[in-house]
Amino acid sequence: MKKLSVTAVGALAGLSLASSVAFAADNNCGKVSVGKMNWGSAAVITEITNFLMVKGYGCDVKMVPTATVTAITSLAENSEPDVVPELWPNSAPAYEKLAAEGKVIKAADVISDGGNENWWIPDYLAEKHPELTKLEGILKNPKLVGGKFHNCPEGWGCRKVNDSLIQAFGLKEAGVEIFNHGSGETLAAAMASAYENKEPYFGYYWGPTAPLGKYNMVPVDLGPYNAEVHTCNGRGPDECPSVGKSSFPAAPVLTVVTKAFKEKNPEVFELVSNISFTNKELSEILAWKDAKKASAADTAAYWLTNNKDTWIEWVNDDAAEKLNKLIK
């Protein structure tokens, strides 16, 4: 991305991400509710979606603060919001029922390669000791990764999976100390400190997130994915009768819409269907957001300003003409 001052980004955000009233009159898109999930990547995606719908298609958008379970419940009971970017179906089992009933429709894999969970080591460690990119290599010489595994906090879903994998792979028996972090903040800080000081590191993290956008981490190969084993591991070693070895699956991450929205606004549905990012792209966006301490709106404006070649392909000709007047 090109460098752009925060002041300039803020000015664009004020111009382009504000109220849509003035733009709604010349288009029959009408009122649209868009769910804004309560985490970084989803908030930025929603702001980008809002900008394109408002300024390109004349929609009168209302962004609705929500979360995964809340959004699914609202869709089931009220058929709202009309559009929900970055829905993780693996955290919302009710989605499959609503989709089967035709109440909600998948518009896009908004993260094209899916959500990302892995055990990681830094790139400089992988380059010096390529054998560490496979777990077998770490277990043979844990001192090379600092002799420690950085685990999720208690109460997180990843903690149960990790605890099962730690037992299945025999990390403790191999001499790896398990460091259970007390918060997500300390988990991220441990990675940051190790990377910035070029020290050994081995631990869990997920994406898209700012740390994975900022630091070049290499996934550790845990072997093939086994759905049945992974599901059992997710219960934790105390409840899974037989923990096993399995890598993490890529999680589907969707933008979904209501049936009524698709039928009323086919051109806007096509736009929403085109909005998609890779995991790496979103992590890099979040790294910029974190470094600048920027809002989701300012981050969206920054991305839109610096990635016109990408989003111009998402919109129709009429929208492109309008948007070209706003972003040169």
Image: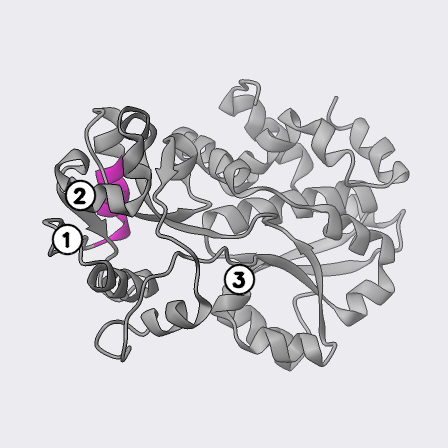
- At x 90%, y 38%, the residue is 318
Q: Position of residue 264 (x, y in %)?
A: 86, 64
Residue bearing the label numbered 1: 178
Closer-to-camera residue (236/214): 236
SS under mark 3: loop
Which is nearer the eye, 114 or 73? 114
Up/down of 76 relative to 133, above or below: below
Label drawn at residue 88:
3
Residues at marks 3 and 2, CA–CA distance in whole angstroms: 36 Å
Q: Quadrant of the C terminus?
A: top right
Q: Mark 3 or 2, which is nearer the eye? A: 2
Residue for point 59% across, 73% down: 95
Distance of mark 1 from mark 3, alpha carbons?
29 Å
Question: Tag 3: residue type?
Answer: Trp
Q: Earlier in the sequence, mark 3 or mark 2?
A: 3
Instruction: Give above or below for 94 relative to 275.
Output: below
Q: Which residue is mark 2?
A: 140
